[in-house]
Image (cartoon, rainbow, N blue to C red):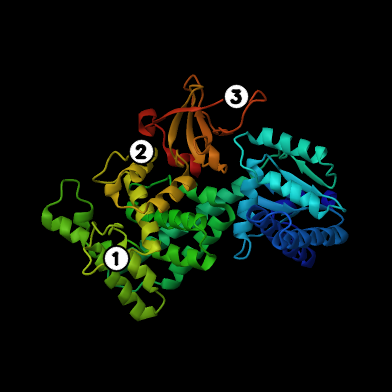
Amino acid sequence: MAESVSRSEVRGGGLSGAGSAHLRRRGRDYVIALYAALRAIRLYPAEHTAVQKTLGELTQLGEEILESERELDLRISGEFLFLNSTRLRLDLTNYASIGYWLRLCKASGVGSIRVYSGAMMRDWLVFLSMLDETSEDSPYERLGALSDHLVRTNIRNIEVVAPIEEDDSEFSEEAKKAAMRTYNQSVAVTKEVINSVRMGRTPSIRKIKRVVQGIVDQILNEETSLIGLTAIRDYDEYTFTHSVNVCIFAVALGRRLGLTKIQLFDLGLSALMHDVGKSRVPLGFLHKTEELSEEEWQRIAAHPWLGVLALFQLRGQQEDVSYRAMTVAYEHHMRVDLSGYPKPLRPRSMSMASRIVAVVDGYDAATTRRVYQTTPYPPSSVLQEMRDNPKRGLDQIVVKAFINLLGIYPVGTLVVLDSFELAIVYAANPRHNMLSRPIVKIVSDAQGNMLHPAPEADLAQTHASGDYPRTIIKTADPERYGINVGDYFV
């Protein structure tokens, strides 16, 4: 079957028609069965009924797929998972299991798992147990050890294969274009909403919902491109791009924290509207470059409860605004110890949505150039401050999850390598033990010559000797080198 499928069909997500839809369903069930078996093995001894049951279901489902398809090849390509030549789609029932399987295989250097008829429950027990082991070895070393272990334990019907080096430029370009459309549309609609509220008109909540749904779908399918666009940080459109960036970060962070798709949508809507109260603050105060007077500061500090009033009015007109959005608008500057603003009238605890938005809002604001902050702080320094300074009043569990999402060097950070090259962080490394070795784009060579296009490099990749060809020495200011970070994400 694989030989008869064209590259365009693979790129498009598999063959069209009932056969493709059927295989997607089987693939979804198969990945969920793998995930269930992994969890059972981790939690219980091998003889436990939960382990035996999940391994039996996995083995049976694999034989059924082999009988109907004549092959079973679970393959990774970028951020996507394919069963044979059909791309598996993310949805509410499987995005956690697919995401976990992708991370596990990448950390183990596995590009494809081929299963042949006759694979037994014992084979899966041995294979999954080793695959899920914690290791400091490189993916290359782990793949070699895994292959050797399969041979030593006489497992012949499960085969692991290294990732295939193929040209994914067309596929990546499509993902980038989709992310850019989502981002631009989100900024345009946010601008329309904020300006409508400022002018006393009623914005379309349906448009806002479509925007948030687009962001959620994009994050669930391929988050790297959309998170990368938050590095654009348009100075002139800060009010609107900030709200969109906060929405993107919040949804991506909520996904890492295990929220459901419905919860992600509700969180995204709340995040997009968190600063709507600023539409009722005079523009002169928001754009003032000099130090604010006490009266001006109080007017700006009133935007949380002004946001509640604006959202409550919208709810009265369209009944499509959740109370959670009002809560987030009110609480996002309150801090977990309630030392922020507005001051609560009685004891309360910030909602989880507010805690998430507070973290991502503070990060995006601190790393963006604005009229009164002409020199933004380096992203890595902001994360360190959020983690180490208790006076920030942020939920430390949420902060740690955010650092795991972005990595020690967040997307958009300019770094200097020990090879004397300059690079921009393009994505966090999917291996959690490699947060200090992100995926980067090399923007200049060792002699200082700018590179166009900028080649991509995974700093976690090693030579056969185990040495790293590139390591980050320090971060740097892009303006010092005349580099516009946003150019490398469009």
- Within-10-Å neighbours for mark 3: few <14, some 14–19, many 20+: few
- Within-10-Å neighbours for mark 2: few <14, some 14–19, many 20+: some
Residue 368 in sight: no
Q: Which residue is mark 2?
A: 381
- Within-10-Å neighbours for mark 1: few <14, some 14–19, many 20+: many
Q: Which mark is residue 431?
A: none
What is the secondary structure assignment of the residue under circle 3?
Answer: loop
Q: Which residue is mark 1?
A: 330
Q: Is residue 128 above or below residue 342?
A: above
At label 2, which amino acid type do we have? Ser
Q: Which residue is mark 3?
A: 467
Residue visible at 36% across and 48% down in the picture:
363
Q: Is residue 425 left or right of residue 85?
A: left
At label 3, which amino acid type do we have? Asp
What x and y, as percent, mark residue 184?
46, 55
Q: Is residue 413 above or below residue 451?
A: below
Q: Is residue 469 left or right of residue 239?
A: right
Proximity of marks 3 and 1: CB atoms separated by less than 8 Å: no
Of the residues under marks 3 and 1, which one precedes in the sequence?
1
At label 1, which amino acid type do we have? Tyr
Judging depth in this view, the residue of 112 and 344 nearest the camera is 344
Judging depth in this view, the residue of 259 and 411 nearest the camera is 259
Residue furthest to the top in view is: 447
What x and y, as percent, mark residue 283?
22, 58
Q: Quadrant of residue 410?
A: top left
Of the residues under marks 2 and 1, which one precedes in the sequence?
1
What x and y, as percent, mark residue 236?
32, 49
